[in-house]
Amino acid sequence: MFRIGLSTPCFPDEECFKSYNRAGIECMEISVDSANYEKLCFDELSELSKKYNVEICSFHFPFMPFSELDISREDLADKSLEYLKGFIDKATEIGIYKFVIHASGEPIEEKDRACRMACAKKSLFTLAEYAKERGAIILVEDLPRTCLGRSISDMEELISAHPDLYVCFDTNHLLYDDNVELIRRLGNKIKSTHISDYDFINERHWLPGEGKNDWQGIINALNEVGYDGVWLYEIDLGCPKTIIRPRSLTYEDFVLNAKELFEGKTPTTISTPKPNLGFWD
């Protein structure tokens, strides 16, 4: 079955790597708060990865603040691309070759979508070429609400910008299309995942079993299209405002959750959603 990974819910220091190793989490995606990207020491990340036998399988580009960083805006695209290229240079030097990107910020008005899509595709082409020269690939993530990438057709158009663009499939972002259909339509273009659950109203980043996803349908579809990447959770340890948990999650909770899902079982949960959740909660 798939290897188990986790996008960093805390800064990737030695204690973080040690906790992954102790719990049996094999892979890590580097993803930190916007203010912490400049604090990353890539040589240290490489050393810790080897020391604790935790593969750094991908790097999530920063995507906020939207007012400063957005590859779909003509006034920000060039500056954003130069900033992101710097991370490709640093990360590929230590053997990270998958880069997850948001094709836009938001909100985007309907009248502006065509223009923003054209700019995003131009930017993605540039990044894909830059990454290819360094043996790396760009993974476009499906996104919620008004963002580019909010539908299967959006994703197909975005990755059409370059033959070497691929997909990071986020299981908690689609609000207008079906996750299983996305897998079947995008097929072998899917090279990584962001695993979490939701209520189909808005993204929630809940633990699988806390929301409405058809997890066996998702797993079966991934197997059907030959997906052989990481089952990579993107969930904070702390309790979000949209759910009630008696305690924070542990790294071991993710491993247990994956084991139960892979065995076709209903996963163990310790929470209940809060009532009256809306689109913008």
Image (cartoon, helix red, strand yellow):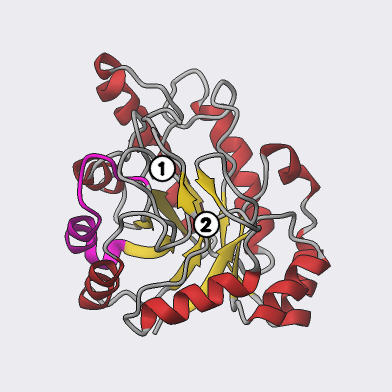
Q: What residue did someone put label 2 on?
A: 234
> Picture coordinates of residue 188 (x, y %)?
27, 68
Q: Amino acid at mark 2?
A: Glu
- Taking the image as shown, residue 26 lies to the left or right of residue 101, namely right
> Picture coordinates of residue 175 (x, y %)?
28, 40
Residue at the image point whose x is 43% and y is 33% from the top: 104
Q: What residue did someone put label 1 on?
A: 203
> Picture coordinates of residue 179 (x, y %)?
25, 55
The magenta span reads 173-189
Distance between the Cα atoms at labels 1 and 2?
A: 12 Å
Residue at the image point whose x is 59% and y is 41% from the top: 62
Q: Is residue 112 visible?
A: yes
- Taking the image as shown, residue 189 lies to the left or right of residue 19, namely left
Q: Is residue 205 visible?
A: no
Find residue 126 and report its image quarter.
top left
Q: Amino acid at mark 1?
A: Glu
The foreground one among 139 and 7 is: 7
Q: How many marks?
A: 2
